[in-house]
Amino acid sequence: LARAAPPTQSTMLRTPPLLASLPPWLPVNSTNTDSKSLSALSMSLAMSLHFFGYEFARGSNMALFTSSTLGFGAASGKYYPLAMACVSPASMALLLGYGRELEKKGPRKALRNTTSFCVGMLLFFGGLVRLLSLQDIGESNVILGFFGGELRLPRNFSQWVIALSFIFQNSYAHLLYAQQWSFLGSIFTPTQASQYYSYVAGLSSLCSMIAGASIDKCVSWMGLPGLLHVAAGSLVCTLLLADWAYGMAERGGFDPSEELVRKRKEKEEKKKHQQEQQVRMPSQQQQRRQQKSPAATPKNHDTNSSKQSKSSSSSSSSLLHQVKQGYTLFKRVPTLGALFLETLTFQSLSTILNTILVTQLKQAVPDDGQRAAWTGNFYATVNGLSTVFQFFLFPFLTRKVEPKVIWRLMPLLPLFCTLVQCASSLDGGSGVLSFLPSALTSKPSAALYLIAVSFLTAKTMDYSLRNVLAELVYVPLDFESRFVGKEVIAVFANRFGKSGMALILSGWQFLRRGIGVGVGSAAFTGGSGGGGGLLGIALMASLGWWGSALRLSSLVLGKEEAEKVVAERMQLGGDEGINDDNKRRRQKEE
């Protein structure tokens, strides 16, 4: 992965023609590490195609949710927080399924099975929405035609379908890309990760930008349900490329699942050793009991052991067991807990800004197709800016600046934009918007552009800096932190932050309807910003994100220290060595 000596004739003969034609910034070379390079490149392409399809799924579901025919129409701003609140339980269900797959079948089959499940769900919702869009939807019933007959369903049946599709679309993305990043984090060293992660993320942003810019034309050609089918087809390519990457890792001897197998063997050996000690060194009371009832004790021992094994197997598959496992993991690795809190605060801020944007977008752009195109162009702009930052800005920052410094500075720009948004709400936009052309500020969509700028800044920081910095945090951690802890943070923390804030927003809307709008200051009552009382909550969330980022920066390892930890882990052949407490415990045991 790091270019070594000039290639000899033998190594040049082993270099595939594909590698020779690739750009020089890709993590490939012409030495005997071609298998690792191709494996990393294959997983990077799989991740890029995953985000390519996700843009189509997001644009389709957002337009369908606010649709006046199939979706919630003018009431979409009311039901959007409720739908986001349901994302967290759905993400938790996906996380439980992933945990079982990882424990039973390993990371390769877990990624394969979860991706196949997502493909099936996207095809199912796309076909069902297509069927509904072709039927007669009245004021009280949805009439479905089957082989000459009719099936009358309640009017809100289409809304339930759209809501379920929307919830699933907001749940599956982090489930898949966290597994893909886990693979890359297992084969990269910290130096290689800081050098190439920005390019991997930039490739994903580039594909997302292309997808977002093409939604406008694709909607007119295949409709909103067809976008879900495109997302499913993109995930099929993702599945093939990711599985090929794992296959090359197995053949090349750098399979991340080897750490899991080694860990299981160590646990089994410890259990056998403890059982042998209990059998060989029984206490005097047990010996007396055995002498009194020699025939009963073996049966009791066998029944007790069988009961314990059954109870342990049942508890291992329960939700409570996984919660306890995550708690002990976060307690053992404080960095994961700090990253969990940082993720919660950022996703809370993102949910507030997104809710305001959805409400303003529905008012400014009533047409479903145009609204889907606007959403696609917005995220295309986000991904375009992220691509520029990831290819040009982030590599320079990682060479010159420590990641902990970037963590401290990153939330400042979204915080500044939120302050400007609140200031424009206080003075009605007369002072803050005075530098803009009068043609723009006189339009009713001026509030839409204001919140779009704030949300654009937050998402650009998220795509270009925050995601890559978070992946760099995982590189020096152990196997359990990279695969289990990361999945808990990526799936549960991301979605719990959205769902928790969505519940708060739902309560806030209920409060406003119950006691009136005049609650608190003007920053909480809205103004030209159009967000009602949400702008004050957004400001508090921005400050909370900055505080959690400062705490996380104090726990992040420096470049040299992280490199030493990974080198020590590779020399030991395992995933230990990251935690000082573990080292002390092993020394005491020895």
Image (cartoon, rainbow, N blue to C red):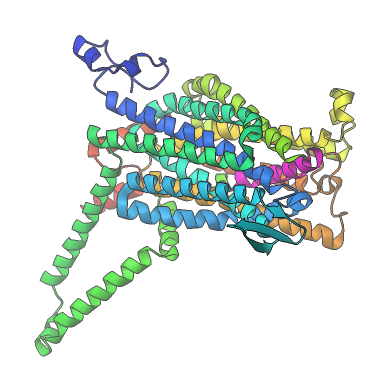
Q: To which quarter of the image does residue 259 belong?
A: top left
Quarter of the figure with the N terminus: top left
Residue 136 picture location, percent across and down: 71, 53
Provide the major secondary structure of the magenta segment: helix
Question: Seen in the image, is 488 located left or right of residue 578?
Answer: right
Part of the protein shown in magenta: 344-366
Tell me residue 514's x, y (percent).
Answer: 83, 63
Asked if the stretch drawn in magenta spans residue 351, the answer is: yes
Q: Count all numbered tags in the image, as a single digit.
A: 0
Q: Is residue 31 above or below residue 453?
A: above
* Location of residue 42 with respect to 98 vertically, above or below: above
Nearer to the camera, 163 or 256:
163
In the foreground, 147 or 122: 147
Name the residue: 70% across, 42% down: 353
Is residue 296 magenta-colored? Answer: no
**Camera-side residue: 392 or 577?**
392
Evaluate whether residue 230 shows in this view: yes
Tell me if 570 is positioned left or right of 46 in this view: left
On the image, the x and y values in percent for residue 224 come to: 63, 41
- Residue 500 falls left or right of residue 333: right
Q: Residue at x 26, y 50 (%)?
A: 263
Q: Residue furthest bottom?
A: 292
Can residue 544 be seen in the rendering of this structure? no
> What is the quadrant of residue 253 in the picture?
top left
